[in-house]
Image (cartoon, rainbow, N blue to C red):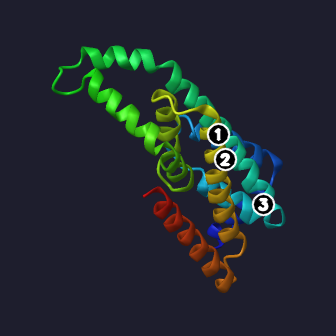
Amino acid sequence: MNWFKQNYERAMRAAGTQFARLFLYVFSFFESIIIPIPTDPLLAACVHARPTIWKQIAILCALWSVAGGAVGWYLGAFSADYVMAMVNQLPHAVMNEEKFQAVADAFQKLGLPLVLIGAFTPLPFKVIAISSGLFGYPLIPFLAVATIGRIARFLLVAAMVRYHKNMRLLSALISGALILVLVGFWMTH
């Protein structure tokens, strides 16, 4: 038990450093492009170690994530011709230009809720970011909706860590998040 306590205290000291927060922000940037591990555990550790600046940590984490999402969007946009060339090489029954265009049209129609869901939920944001660029969803609306979704998500995670001992506040936060998700689904249908 003493070994666990010592390592926990060491980890919390490390998580409270400026270097740990910088690592969190850089990790959040690359998680929005390629890293398959979610940012949330690192965010939770940094907030737990420095609870007085939980909002700052969460917002900066979200902004770095959106910046990474912008890079993902550009990767998708610049690879569209390459992907189309690959689609044209596939057997017509599997995928063809018409089917690909149907997916692109659906993304244009449902892009806003898809981006919001991808930004707020644990779904891989990188998939939504790259797909947004690939299917031609406009960059500015993508960035606006992604910023709202990522800030909301990371503030919720940070607040849950910060106020984990206040069950009434924690219940209110979770209920508010669920209501937002339900309202979002309702508005898109």
Measured from the top left, where is residue 128 in percent x and y?
49, 40
Query: Toward which corner of the image does residue 26 lie, by quadrant?
Result: top right
Q: Is residue 89 above or below residue 33?
A: above
Q: Is residue 13 above or below residue 18?
A: below
Circle 2 is placed at which residue position? 147
Quadrant containing the N terminus in the rendered view:
bottom right
Name the residue: 63% across, 67% down.
3
Q: Quick check: 17 left or right of 35?
A: right
Name the residue: 50% across, 55% down.
122
Q: Which mark is residue 55?
A: 3
Quadrant containing the C terminus in the rendered view:
bottom left
Q: State yes or no: discs 2 and 1 in contact (Cβ < 8 Å).
A: yes
Q: Which residue ends up furthest to the left in the rendered image?
A: 93
Under mark 1, the amino acid is: Leu
Q: Nearer the viewer, mark 1 or mark 3?
A: 1
Under mark 2, the amino acid is: Thr
How far apart are the two marked residues, 2 and 3, measured between alpha carbons?
A: 15 Å
In front of the other: 130 or 37: 130
> Mark 3: few, some, or many residues within 10 Å (few <14, many ≥20)?
some
Which secondary structure lies at badge 1?
helix
Which sits earlier in the primary sequence, circle 1 or circle 3?
3
Which secondary structure lies at badge 2?
helix
